């Protein structure tokens, strides 16, 4: 956490949805970063060591979707918490890394901020 504020990276290819998600993160009291695809997200994760949570969409252009990105993050940056959302795919928990949360779009803003607060409060454990 930077200056006592958790840092949340929003990964979403739709500009309007990404802007809305960033506003949600900011309104919950966290610092928000944004990326339009997995490649940009990985670049940000590689350049910073203060990201606490990644909130990603599943369907994205580029070299990997949100599912592959979440597994890549879990393998490379195990302490980073993960929230995955999709309007297209209904995921089973077994498809996601341990400790991550899935939400169908359209999601309830309060459910997302509650999940962020819960995941950020559990320290460096990967369990949920």
Image: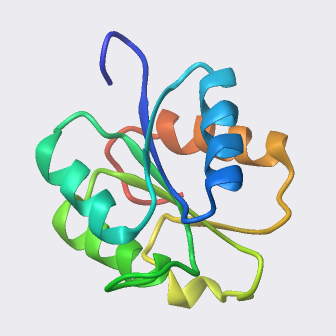
Residue at 45% x, 82% y is 65
Q: How many marks?
A: 0
Residue 22 located left or right of residue 40: right
Is the residue 85 above or below the residue 61 in the image? Answer: above
Q: The C terminus is located in which quarter?
A: bottom right
6 or 94, which lies in front?
A: 6
Residue at 80% x, 47% y is 111
Residue at 71% x, 88% y is 89
Specify the color scheme: rainbow
Q: Position of residue 47 (x, y in %)?
A: 13, 44
Is the residue 51 above or below the residue 79 in the image? Answer: above
Q: Position of residue 87 (x, y in %)?
A: 77, 77
Residue lying farthest to the top in this orientation: 3
Is the residue 44 above or below the residue 49 in the image? Answer: below
Write down the quadrant of residue 59 in the picture: bottom right
Residue at 24% x, 49% y is 44
Q: Position of residue 100 (x, y in %)?
A: 51, 65
Residue 33 located left or right of residue 60: left
Is the residue 86 above or below the residue 17 in the image? Answer: below
Residue lying farthest to the left in this orientation: 47
Q: The N terminus is located in which quarter?
A: top left
């Amino acid at each position: 956490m930077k200056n006592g504020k958790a840092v949340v990276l929003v990964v979403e290819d739709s500009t309007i949805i990404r802007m809305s998600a960033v506003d949600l993160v900011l309104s919950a009291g966290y610092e928000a970063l944004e990326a339009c695809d997995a490649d940009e997200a990985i670049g940000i994760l590689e350049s910073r060591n203060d990201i606490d949570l990644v909130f990603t969409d599943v369907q994205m252009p580029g070299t990997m979707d949100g599912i592959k990105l979440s597994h890549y993050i879990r393998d490379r940056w195990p302490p980073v918490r993960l929230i995955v959302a999709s309007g297209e795919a209904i995921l089973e928990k077994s498809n996601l890394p341990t400790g991550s949360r899935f939400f169908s779009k359209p999601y309830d803003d309060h459910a997302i901020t509650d999940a962020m607060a819960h995941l950020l409060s559990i320290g460096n454990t990967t369990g949920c």
